[in-house]
Amino acid sequence: MNAARMIIRRSESLGTALSDGVTLRCHFAFADWQDPTHVHEGSLRAVNILSLPSGDRYRIGPESNVEILTWVERGSLTTKTDDFSCENLKPGDLHLVSAGQGCTSLNWSAEQGATDCLQFWLLPDQTNCEPTQEVRQAFPETQDGAFRILASGFPEDDPEEGETVADGSPIALQTRARLLRATLPANEGAVYQTTPGRDLYLIVISGHVTIKDAVLFQGDAAAFENCETFTVIAQEKSVLLLTDVPAI
Protein backbone atom coordinates (compact mmCIF):
# COMPACT_ATOMS: atom_id res chain seq x y z
CA MET A 1 0.00 0.00 0.00
CA ASN A 2 1.30 3.45 -0.91
CA ALA A 3 1.97 5.85 1.95
CA ALA A 4 -0.47 8.70 2.55
CA ARG A 5 0.86 12.08 1.58
CA MET A 6 -0.22 15.72 1.59
CA ILE A 7 1.18 18.02 -1.09
CA ILE A 8 0.95 21.77 -0.45
CA ARG A 9 0.34 24.05 -3.42
CA ARG A 10 1.10 27.70 -2.71
CA SER A 11 -0.97 30.33 -4.49
CA GLU A 12 2.11 31.97 -6.01
CA SER A 13 2.94 28.69 -7.81
CA LEU A 14 -0.31 28.62 -9.80
CA GLY A 15 -0.10 28.89 -13.55
CA THR A 16 -1.48 31.62 -15.81
CA ALA A 17 -3.38 30.73 -18.96
CA LEU A 18 -5.03 32.80 -21.67
CA SER A 19 -8.39 31.40 -22.78
CA ASP A 20 -10.84 33.35 -24.99
CA GLY A 21 -8.79 36.46 -24.24
CA VAL A 22 -9.37 36.02 -20.48
CA THR A 23 -6.50 35.43 -18.08
CA LEU A 24 -7.05 32.47 -15.74
CA ARG A 25 -5.12 31.38 -12.67
CA CYS A 26 -4.78 27.62 -12.98
CA HIS A 27 -4.09 24.87 -10.45
CA PHE A 28 -3.56 22.35 -13.29
CA ALA A 29 -2.41 22.52 -16.91
CA PHE A 30 -4.98 24.35 -19.02
CA ALA A 31 -5.17 26.08 -22.42
CA ASP A 32 -1.75 27.58 -23.23
CA TRP A 33 -0.28 26.89 -19.76
CA GLN A 34 1.19 23.41 -19.62
CA ASP A 35 3.01 21.91 -16.64
CA PRO A 36 3.77 18.17 -16.63
CA THR A 37 4.01 18.21 -12.80
CA HIS A 38 0.45 19.55 -12.42
CA VAL A 39 -1.77 17.83 -14.99
CA HIS A 40 -4.71 16.72 -12.84
CA GLU A 41 -5.61 15.26 -9.43
CA GLY A 42 -7.48 12.03 -10.02
CA SER A 43 -10.56 12.79 -12.11
CA LEU A 44 -10.29 16.48 -11.19
CA ARG A 45 -9.04 17.74 -14.53
CA ALA A 46 -8.83 21.48 -13.86
CA VAL A 47 -9.37 24.16 -11.23
CA ASN A 48 -9.37 27.67 -12.68
CA ILE A 49 -9.79 31.04 -10.98
CA LEU A 50 -11.78 33.36 -13.20
CA SER A 51 -11.93 37.13 -12.57
CA LEU A 52 -14.11 39.16 -14.91
CA PRO A 53 -14.40 42.96 -14.94
CA SER A 54 -17.93 44.30 -15.20
CA GLY A 55 -19.30 43.74 -18.69
CA ASP A 56 -16.75 41.10 -19.69
CA ARG A 57 -17.57 37.60 -20.88
CA TYR A 58 -15.75 34.27 -20.89
CA ARG A 59 -16.72 31.86 -23.66
CA ILE A 60 -15.52 28.32 -24.40
CA GLY A 61 -16.68 25.47 -26.59
CA PRO A 62 -17.33 23.14 -28.08
CA GLU A 63 -16.79 20.87 -25.04
CA SER A 64 -17.77 17.25 -24.46
CA ASN A 65 -17.51 14.61 -21.75
CA VAL A 66 -16.62 17.02 -18.97
CA GLU A 67 -18.53 18.43 -16.01
CA ILE A 68 -17.86 22.10 -15.24
CA LEU A 69 -18.85 23.41 -11.81
CA THR A 70 -18.76 27.21 -11.37
CA TRP A 71 -18.81 28.55 -7.80
CA VAL A 72 -19.18 32.32 -7.38
CA GLU A 73 -16.99 33.94 -4.74
CA ARG A 74 -17.78 37.61 -5.39
CA GLY A 75 -20.06 39.58 -7.71
CA SER A 76 -22.81 38.40 -10.05
CA LEU A 77 -22.44 36.01 -12.96
CA THR A 78 -24.83 35.22 -15.81
CA THR A 79 -24.44 31.85 -17.55
CA LYS A 80 -25.71 30.74 -20.96
CA THR A 81 -25.05 27.31 -22.47
CA ASP A 82 -26.55 26.31 -25.83
CA ASP A 83 -30.34 26.05 -25.50
CA PHE A 84 -30.40 25.88 -21.71
CA SER A 85 -32.00 28.77 -19.83
CA CYS A 86 -29.88 31.72 -18.70
CA GLU A 87 -29.01 31.62 -15.02
CA ASN A 88 -27.89 34.47 -12.76
CA LEU A 89 -25.52 33.47 -9.97
CA LYS A 90 -24.79 35.33 -6.74
CA PRO A 91 -21.98 34.74 -4.20
CA GLY A 92 -22.07 31.17 -2.94
CA ASP A 93 -24.21 29.92 -5.82
CA LEU A 94 -23.08 26.88 -7.81
CA HIS A 95 -23.74 26.11 -11.48
CA LEU A 96 -23.14 22.80 -13.27
CA VAL A 97 -22.90 22.05 -16.96
CA SER A 98 -22.44 18.36 -17.77
CA ALA A 99 -21.35 18.60 -21.39
CA GLY A 100 -21.93 14.92 -22.14
CA GLN A 101 -22.06 14.24 -25.87
CA GLY A 102 -21.35 17.88 -26.56
CA CYS A 103 -22.14 21.54 -25.86
CA THR A 104 -21.32 24.05 -28.57
CA SER A 105 -21.09 27.29 -26.60
CA LEU A 106 -20.63 27.91 -22.86
CA ASN A 107 -20.71 31.53 -21.66
CA TRP A 108 -20.20 33.27 -18.32
CA SER A 109 -20.75 37.06 -18.15
CA ALA A 110 -20.13 39.63 -15.40
CA GLU A 111 -22.91 42.05 -16.21
CA GLN A 112 -23.18 44.03 -12.95
CA GLY A 113 -19.81 44.62 -11.35
CA ALA A 114 -16.56 42.66 -11.24
CA THR A 115 -16.96 38.95 -10.53
CA ASP A 116 -14.62 36.29 -9.11
CA CYS A 117 -15.38 32.59 -9.38
CA LEU A 118 -13.76 29.16 -9.38
CA GLN A 119 -14.37 26.56 -12.05
CA PHE A 120 -13.84 22.85 -11.38
CA TRP A 121 -13.58 20.49 -14.38
CA LEU A 122 -14.41 16.84 -13.63
CA LEU A 123 -14.02 13.82 -15.90
CA PRO A 124 -17.34 11.89 -15.83
CA ASP A 125 -17.61 8.15 -15.20
CA GLN A 126 -19.72 7.66 -18.34
CA THR A 127 -19.21 9.41 -21.66
CA ASN A 128 -21.61 10.73 -24.30
CA CYS A 129 -24.56 11.25 -21.96
CA GLU A 130 -27.21 13.89 -22.65
CA PRO A 131 -25.99 17.37 -21.66
CA THR A 132 -27.54 18.76 -18.48
CA GLN A 133 -27.54 21.98 -16.47
CA GLU A 134 -28.30 22.48 -12.78
CA VAL A 135 -28.09 25.34 -10.27
CA ARG A 136 -27.71 25.29 -6.51
CA GLN A 137 -28.32 28.53 -4.66
CA ALA A 138 -26.29 29.47 -1.59
CA PHE A 139 -27.80 28.43 1.74
CA PRO A 140 -25.80 30.34 4.40
CA GLU A 141 -27.74 28.79 7.27
CA THR A 142 -26.39 25.35 6.31
CA GLN A 143 -22.79 26.33 5.56
CA ASP A 144 -21.15 26.93 8.96
CA GLY A 145 -18.96 24.35 10.62
CA ALA A 146 -18.45 20.94 9.02
CA PHE A 147 -17.91 20.22 5.34
CA ARG A 148 -21.26 20.52 3.52
CA ILE A 149 -21.83 18.79 0.19
CA LEU A 150 -22.54 21.18 -2.70
CA ALA A 151 -22.43 18.64 -5.54
CA SER A 152 -22.30 14.85 -5.54
CA GLY A 153 -22.40 11.84 -7.81
CA PHE A 154 -23.35 9.49 -4.95
CA PRO A 155 -27.05 8.52 -4.81
CA GLU A 156 -26.87 8.22 -1.02
CA ASP A 157 -26.30 11.98 -0.87
CA ASP A 158 -29.91 12.28 -2.09
CA PRO A 159 -29.84 15.07 -4.67
CA GLU A 160 -33.17 16.52 -5.75
CA GLU A 161 -34.37 16.17 -9.30
CA GLY A 162 -34.92 19.25 -11.42
CA GLU A 163 -32.89 22.19 -12.62
CA THR A 164 -32.92 24.26 -9.42
CA VAL A 165 -32.22 22.90 -5.96
CA ALA A 166 -34.49 24.58 -3.43
CA ASP A 167 -33.49 23.26 -0.01
CA GLY A 168 -29.70 22.97 0.12
CA SER A 169 -29.49 19.47 -1.39
CA PRO A 170 -26.43 18.88 -3.58
CA ILE A 171 -26.30 19.14 -7.34
CA ALA A 172 -26.25 15.72 -9.04
CA LEU A 173 -22.99 14.86 -10.81
CA GLN A 174 -22.36 12.20 -13.44
CA THR A 175 -19.11 11.16 -11.76
CA ARG A 176 -18.71 9.64 -8.30
CA ALA A 177 -17.21 12.81 -6.93
CA ARG A 178 -18.11 15.48 -4.40
CA LEU A 179 -17.59 19.22 -4.08
CA LEU A 180 -17.88 20.45 -0.50
CA ARG A 181 -17.66 23.74 1.36
CA ALA A 182 -16.76 24.52 4.97
CA THR A 183 -17.05 27.88 6.72
CA LEU A 184 -15.08 27.64 9.96
CA PRO A 185 -15.02 30.19 12.81
CA ALA A 186 -11.62 31.03 14.30
CA ASN A 187 -10.10 28.23 16.41
CA GLU A 188 -12.65 25.67 15.25
CA GLY A 189 -11.97 22.67 13.06
CA ALA A 190 -13.54 20.14 10.73
CA VAL A 191 -12.74 16.51 10.02
CA TYR A 192 -13.23 14.96 6.61
CA GLN A 193 -13.23 11.23 5.97
CA THR A 194 -13.45 9.42 2.64
CA THR A 195 -12.99 5.87 1.32
CA PRO A 196 -9.96 4.14 -0.24
CA GLY A 197 -9.08 4.97 -3.83
CA ARG A 198 -9.93 8.66 -3.59
CA ASP A 199 -7.94 11.86 -4.17
CA LEU A 200 -8.77 15.02 -2.20
CA TYR A 201 -7.99 18.61 -3.17
CA LEU A 202 -8.57 21.41 -0.64
CA ILE A 203 -8.51 25.15 -1.47
CA VAL A 204 -8.43 27.98 1.07
CA ILE A 205 -10.84 30.60 -0.29
CA SER A 206 -10.36 33.01 2.61
CA GLY A 207 -8.69 33.07 6.02
CA HIS A 208 -5.89 30.68 6.98
CA VAL A 209 -5.84 27.19 8.44
CA THR A 210 -3.53 24.50 9.77
CA ILE A 211 -3.41 20.82 8.84
CA LYS A 212 -1.03 18.95 11.13
CA ASP A 213 2.10 21.15 11.06
CA ALA A 214 1.31 22.85 7.76
CA VAL A 215 -0.13 26.37 7.53
CA LEU A 216 -2.24 27.25 4.49
CA PHE A 217 -3.14 30.83 3.64
CA GLN A 218 -5.75 32.33 1.33
CA GLY A 219 -5.31 30.92 -2.17
CA ASP A 220 -3.21 27.94 -1.07
CA ALA A 221 -4.26 24.36 -1.74
CA ALA A 222 -3.45 20.89 -0.46
CA ALA A 223 -3.70 17.58 -2.34
CA PHE A 224 -4.23 14.39 -0.32
CA GLU A 225 -3.30 11.07 -1.90
CA ASN A 226 -3.83 7.66 -0.25
CA CYS A 227 -5.28 9.60 2.67
CA GLU A 228 -8.71 8.68 3.97
CA THR A 229 -9.06 11.39 6.64
CA PHE A 230 -7.68 14.77 7.67
CA THR A 231 -8.46 17.49 10.20
CA VAL A 232 -8.28 21.20 9.40
CA ILE A 233 -8.20 23.94 12.06
CA ALA A 234 -9.10 27.57 11.26
CA GLN A 235 -6.74 30.17 12.70
CA GLU A 236 -9.23 32.88 11.72
CA LYS A 237 -12.66 32.69 10.09
CA SER A 238 -12.01 30.67 6.94
CA VAL A 239 -13.88 29.41 3.90
CA LEU A 240 -12.70 26.17 2.25
CA LEU A 241 -13.67 24.24 -0.86
CA LEU A 242 -12.85 20.53 -1.14
CA THR A 243 -13.12 18.06 -4.01
CA ASP A 244 -13.26 14.30 -3.38
CA VAL A 245 -12.70 12.41 -6.64
CA PRO A 246 -11.72 8.96 -7.91
CA ALA A 247 -7.96 8.43 -8.06
CA ILE A 248 -7.03 7.64 -11.67
Image (cartoon, rainbow, N blue to C red):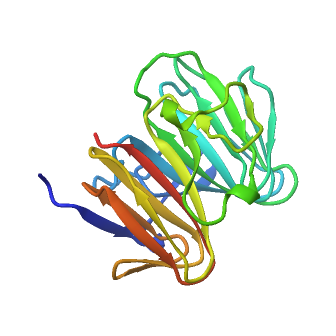
Q: Position of residue 192 (x, y in %)?
A: 43, 59
**Horizontal relation, residue 69 to residue 213: left or right:** right
Quarter of the image for residue 227 reads: bottom left
Q: Is residue 104 visible?
A: no
**Horizontal relation, residue 143 to residue 125: left or right:** right
Q: Residue furthest right?
A: 112
Identify the residue shown where x is 34% and y is 55%: 38
Q: Residue furthest left?
A: 1
Q: Position of residue 197 (x, y in %)?
A: 27, 44
Placement of 61 over or under 24, stated as above or below? above
**Horizontal relation, residue 184 to residue 124: left or right:** right
Quarter of the image for residue 53 reads: bottom right
Quarter of the image for residue 232 reads: bottom left
**Horizontal relation, residue 151 to residue 199: left or right:** right
Which quadrant is the C terminus positioned in? top left
Q: Nearer the viewer, residue 8 or 107?
A: 8
Q: How many marks?
A: 0
Identify the residue shown where x is 74% and y is 51%: 138
Identify the residue shown where x is 59% and y is 77%: 207
Placement of 114 over or under 208, stated as above or below? above
